[in-house]
Image (spheres, rainbow, N blue to C red):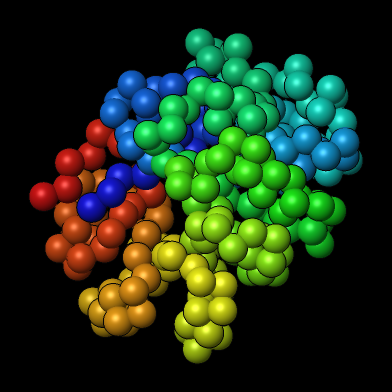
Amino acid sequence: MQLIAHRGASGHAPENTLGAFKLALEMGAKAIELDVHQTRDHELVVVHDENLKRTGGWKAAIKNLAFEELAPVDVGSWFHKRFAVERVPRLEEVYDLVGPSVELHVELKRGSSLYPGIEERVVDLIQHRKAWDRTLVSSFDHEALYSVRSIDSRVRLGYLLGLTPMRTAWREMKELKAESLNCSARQIDARRVRECRARDLRVLVYTVNTQKEASRLAKLGVDGIFTNFPELKPE
Ligand code: G3P
Ligand code: MG
């Protein structure tokens, strides 16, 4: 079972920062998940929420900020003062940091409905870096996945289930040629794993932070888990 460092090694360092990604690499992670939003001036930035309130003490929506305004914000101190140097990374910087042998799960928090042109920009980056093999684009915003697929048939897609009924989800995953069903630990059981197998879909489960839960999912035959603790050793 693959361990995917969720927002980096975010159990040990502030989520979605270069510090958390570096630590994940040092801990031997072979796959890293991160979240992407877009600034007013169309910069792709790595952060989970739509604003920096929780991690940087800033209420303004990212979509209304220029990258220059967001760049100085300390997004590490909330976790621990020794991370005060951490800033919101641009997606490009994460690709620069993480070598080609490590898979990046790039979660688009929203598509063009909130961030005009975000799908084109992400695909441009993947194409420019010839990063098709090492990138998996995922989203709860399935329209965003359709946009990505319409731009480039080579991009690997993960379908984040959310509240979508399974009938719709199976159809959409087929239309999208998605590679994986990404769902929460509460949404998976042996039957659903079998249904994914029958459709040649991998099963990736979030967010799994204990040894016990990781071992349970490994026994179910899940292909990968998103975890804040990449040191887990599921039996
Ligand atoms: O991609 C899996 C997981 O990251 C989805 O939830 O809220 O942690 O981005 P969230
Ligand atoms: Mg995520």
Residue 7 in view of the camera:
yes
Residue 145, position as x, y percentages in the image: 63, 64
Occupied quadrant, residue 48? top right
Residue 9 in view of the camera:
no
Q: Residue at x 23, y 39 (%)?
A: 232
Residue 80, position as x, y percentages in the image: 50, 18
Q: Residue at x 56, y 79 (%)?
A: 175
Q: Which residue is more in the foreground, 8 or 123?
A: 123
In the image, taking residue 75 as reference, residue 154 lies left or right, namely left
In the image, taking residue 218 as reference, residue 128 lies left or right, namely right
Q: Residue at x 63, y 44 (%)?
A: 127
Q: Which residue is more in the foreground, 105 or 50?
A: 105
Q: Residue at x 85, y 24 (%)?
A: 69
Residue 171, compared with residue 152, is above or below; it is below
Residue 25, position as x, y percentages in the image: 37, 26
In the image, taking residue 93 as reference, residue 167 lies left or right, namely left
In the image, taking residue 44 as reference, residue 8 lies left or right, namely left
Q: Which residue is more in the foreground, 28 or 9?
A: 28
Residue 174, compared with residue 186, is above or below; it is below
Q: Which residue is more in the foreground, 223 or 13?
A: 223
The furthest residue to the left: 235
Occupied quadrant, residue 163? bottom right
Residue 161, position as x, y percentages in the image: 51, 70
- Number of callouts: 0
